[in-house]
Image (tube, rainbow, N blue to C red):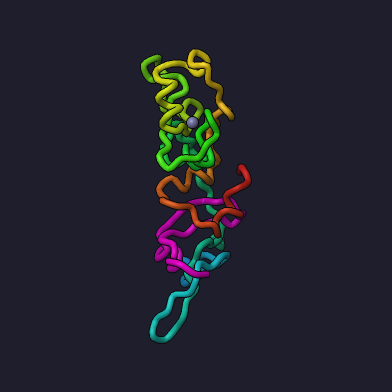
Amino acid sequence: MTGPLPTHTLVLNASHEPLSVVPLRRAFTLVEAGKADLIESAGVLRSPSRTFDAPAVVRLARYVHVPYRRSTHAVRRVVLARDAYLCQYCGRGSRSLTVDHVVPRSRGGDTTWENVVAACVPCNRRKGARLPSEAGMRLLHRPLIPSRALLLCRGIRAIPTTWEPYLSPAR
Ligand SMILES: [Zn+2]
């Protein structure tokens, strides 16, 4: 693998479900201590005496039970990833996507997963403080609560491609 090493590692539970995202150094410590197995390497780290695999994905040796609290408050970065970085009105990708409240805030719409979508600037302007039907616009997809896996990545700038096989199924 070429390019810079990622800064974070995806941690899978012993059951293979995505569990958390931790700094690479922390994941490395887990592997060295035998608490986690390396599943995917992001490349090689070198010290004067050894080479190490930089962990992209690790799996915990023992299952940990973590109660899952669904967050209802939508986070921009995750909304854009959920909507595949495409405007949910015109379907176009844009570098400057905004988050549109389907039911406008001025009409009581909340910043929840089911009420926000990625929208390009022209579509967001055109819609304004109206409902899509009032603006003669239609949503391409109904906005849904993202998967737990996608929620884990809310602090990550770019989701590494090595994580994708572990994140894609809705778990
Ligand atoms: Zn658009």
Q: Nearer the viewer, residue 17 or 131?
A: 131
Residue 12: % across, % down: 55, 56
- Quarter of the image with the C terminus is top right
Residue positioned 52% across, 65% down in the render? 36
Residue 52: % across, % down: 47, 76
Residue positioned 41% across, 19% down in the render? 104
Residue 134: % across, % down: 49, 13
Q: Residue furthest bottom?
A: 49
Left or right, residue 163 beside residue 28: right
Q: Quadrant of residue 47?
A: bottom left
Residue positioned 58% across, 29% down in the render? 140
Residue 89: % across, % down: 52, 28
Above or below, comparing residue 3 to residue 151 in the picture: below
Q: Is residue 108 magenta?
A: no
Q: Quadrant of residue 126?
A: top left
Q: Is residue 24 magenta?
A: yes
Q: Nearer the viewer, residue 97 or 38?
A: 97
Above or below, comparing residue 27 to residue 91 in the picture: below
Left or right, residue 46 beside residue 150: left
Above or below, comparing residue 60 to residue 167 in the picture: below
Q: Which residues are magenta?
A: 1-29
Left or right, residue 82 beside residue 109: right
* Total numbered circles: 0
